[in-house]
């Protein structure tokens, strides 16, 4: 059974169609990267999986069930955005605990989940700091921690590194790769950066104007691009 499956998914905003007949099957534990130029529909496709948008056609399935009308909180997913969206008045600990509190998780269970996430992300010494007392990279780790504590089946990342400087981008990218290895979770990751895509992905989905141009491993796309668009985007000579 696929962890996430899209069946002929389309999305229109008014008359504008931004996602066109996307079919995609993602295996449990896969690291999938959506790439493509700005405006091609990467974020929209991710938001359709998250339930932040409803498809205007087709089906979104998670864990073998159609989730089209389920809210994000009922999909077993957690999302990390490019802007960290932390609560400024709360400590890192409270930021991590907040979603679990809303879900009426018990105090002991919350504490265990927060500490485990903090350990995985190596942010234990930072838990009593507020966001303004953290660097950009540390804030993004707290944001990832907020996703982690919920033990989602599927992690969704939308350009999580784009607000970081070059050195931190590399470090955080390695961190995400390590997490994927350790958790064996399904991850869907959006970027317009082909280096991120090539280094992180088990399989890359190349999008162009709301359509899938090609799906394949980094090596497949590099050695056998389906067309000029993919070749140009992946940067192999053709
Ligand atoms: P990407 O993440 O690849 O840059 P997006 O998914 O954000 O692209 O956007 C794809 C297209 O859909 C763009 O043309 C964008 O302007 C349009 N779009 C996205 N969200 C909305 C919305 N809520 N209403 C109208 N148009 C939207
Ligand atoms: Mg986007």
Image (cartoon, helix red, strand yellow):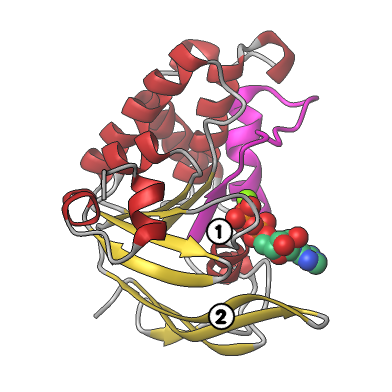
Cα separation, mark 1 vs mark 2, equals: 12 Å
Residue lying farthest front? Answer: 238
Res 120 visible: no
Q: Mark 2, residues whose alpha carbon is within 10 Å: few (<14), some, or many (≥20)? A: some
Q: With respect to residue 29, does 177 lie above or below?
A: above
In the rendered image, residue 30 lying in the magenta stretch gets the answer no
Q: Is mark 2 within 8 Å of ligand 1?
A: no
Q: Position of residue 34 (x, y in %)?
A: 44, 56
Where on the image, by quarter, is ligand 1? bottom right
Q: Position of residue 174 (x, y in %)?
A: 32, 26
Q: Position of residue 12 (x, y in %)?
A: 72, 80
Q: Is mark 1 within 8 Å of ligand 1?
A: yes
Q: Which mark is residue 20?
A: 2
The residue nearer to you, when weighing 127 against 62, is 62
Q: Which mark is residue 22?
A: none
Res 191 visible: yes
Q: Position of residue 214 (x, y in %)?
A: 33, 67
Circle 1 is placed at which residue position?
A: 42
Q: Quadrant of residue 159?
A: top right
Left or right: residue 126 versus residue 188 is: right
Is mark 1 in CB contact (under 8 Å) with mark 2? Answer: no
Left or right: residue 172 versus residue 69 is: left
Point out the image quarter for the N terminus.
Answer: bottom left
Q: With respect to residue 91, does 73 lie above or below?
A: below
Left or right: residue 205 versus residue 45 is: left
Which residue is at a point 26% across and 44% down the rendered structure image? 237
Q: Earlier in the sequence, mark 1 or mark 2?
A: 2
Instruction: Write down the region rendered in magenta.
Output: 77-103
Which residue is at a point 62% across and 26% down the rendered structure image? 163
Left or right: residue 87 versus residue 81 is: right
């Amino acid at each position: 059974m696929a962890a996430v499956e899209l069946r002929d998914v389309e999305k229109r905003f008014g008359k504008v169609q931004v996602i066109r007949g996307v079919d995609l099957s993602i295996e449990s534990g896969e690291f999938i990267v959506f790439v493509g130029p700005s405006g091609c529909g990467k974020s929209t496709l991710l938001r359709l999986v998250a339930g932040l948008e409803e498809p205007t056609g087709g089906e979104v399935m998670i864990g073998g069930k159609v989730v089209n009308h389920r809210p994000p909180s009922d999909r077993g997913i957690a999302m990390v955005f490019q802007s960290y969206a932390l609560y400024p008045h709360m400590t890192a600990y409270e930021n991590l605990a907040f979603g679990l509190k809303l879900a009426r998780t018990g105090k002991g269970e919350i504490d265990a989940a927060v500490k485990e996430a903090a350990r995985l992300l190596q942010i234990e010494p930072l838990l009593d700091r507020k966001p303004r007392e953290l660097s950009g990279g540390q804030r993004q780790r707290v944001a990832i921690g907020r996703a982690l504590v919920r033990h989602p089946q599927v992690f969704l990342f939308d350009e999580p590194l784009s607000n970081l400087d070059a050195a931190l981008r590399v470090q955080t990218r390695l961190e995400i790769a390590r997490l994927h290895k350790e958790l064996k979770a399904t991850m869907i990751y959006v970027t317009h950066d082909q280096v991120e895509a090539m280094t992180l992905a088990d399989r890359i989905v190349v999008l162009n104007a709301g359509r899938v141009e090609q799906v394949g491993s980094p090596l497949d796309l590099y050695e056998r691009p389906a067309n000029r668009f993919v070749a140009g985007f992946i940067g192999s000579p053709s």
